[in-house]
Amino acid sequence: MSTTTKKSIFYFTPQERIDLAISYISLSIAFSFVLMNFRLIGGESLRSPILAIPIAFIAVGTGFVCHELAHREAAKNYGFHSEYRAWYPMLIIAIVFAIFTGFILAIPGATYFFGQNVSKKQNGVISLAGPVSNLILGLILIGIGLFSPSEFWAIIFLSAAQINFWFAFFNMLPIFMLDGVKVLEWKAEVWLAMILLSGLLVFFPELLFYFLGALI
């Protein structure tokens, strides 16, 4: 195992800070255009940027940035050096694609880690950390949304939660370059549990609200 000194989660190299900031802003802009074509939780049309923009920036800020940081911190926990790097051509494509099609095509970059003799378990745990962070953040955003002082903010936080669940589900798909492939190679039962749970939250969110209603 590498003997790399583990730095604080708030430590970023200058290049990593720039890459994360540009990726965050670019993806938020792309998602703003996409969201104006959909209806999310609450049933209101998001064609107005007044709703679409804050949802996009909150959802991407939590769903993307925290996802990548979760990968990075899991890798650092094993003693590996890890940093996020943006793929600038793909960020441009994401914005252009969103403007002209109303759909998202986002492969903004990746969190790389460097270590010797990386095991399947280590690779799987590092890959799993991102989608797990999305599920946790989604549940936190739902809690904030349910206790928001106005319907406007409730729609924003609940919709951002829904997007976090979608991030988790999408990244758990067993497709090359996505997290699901590495988790599946490590433990099939963990992958199955994660994709089923995230899939339920994406496609049947009413089950979660029914459960929360029963608790409350």
Image: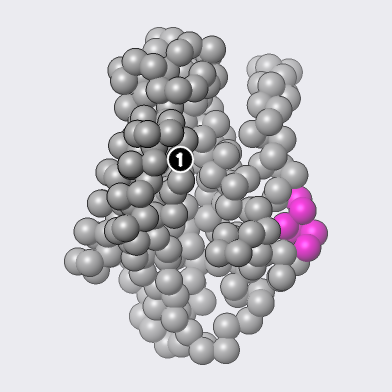
Q: Is residue 10 visible?
A: no
| Vertical comparison of 160 with 51: above or below | below
Give the magenta-colored segment's residue range: 188-193
Q: What is the x, y in percent for residue 147?
A: 48, 18
Which scheme is used to colour this image of the protein? one colour
Q: Quadrant of residue 166?
A: top right
Q: Quadrant of residue 108?
A: bottom left
Would residue 155 be found to the left or right of residue 170 on screen? left
Would residue 31 be found to the left or right of residue 180 on screen? left
Q: What is the x, y in percent for residue 122?
A: 60, 74
User: Which residue was labeled with disc 1?
Assistant: 104
Would residue 186 be found to the left or right of residue 65 on screen? right
At a point 72% along the width and 64% down the height, the residue shown is 184
| Vertical comparison of 215 with 12: above or below | above
At a point 36% along the width and 65% down the height, the residue shown is 84
At a point 47% along the width and 58% down the height, the residue shown is 70
189 within the magenta span? yes
Looking at the picture, tell me which residue is in the foreground, 98 or 56. Answer: 98
Q: What is the x, y in percent for residue 55?
A: 39, 28
Give the residue type that dot 1 points to.
Ile
- From the image, which quarter does the C terminus lie in? top right
At a point 36% along the width and 80% down the height, the residue shown is 5
Q: How many marks?
A: 1
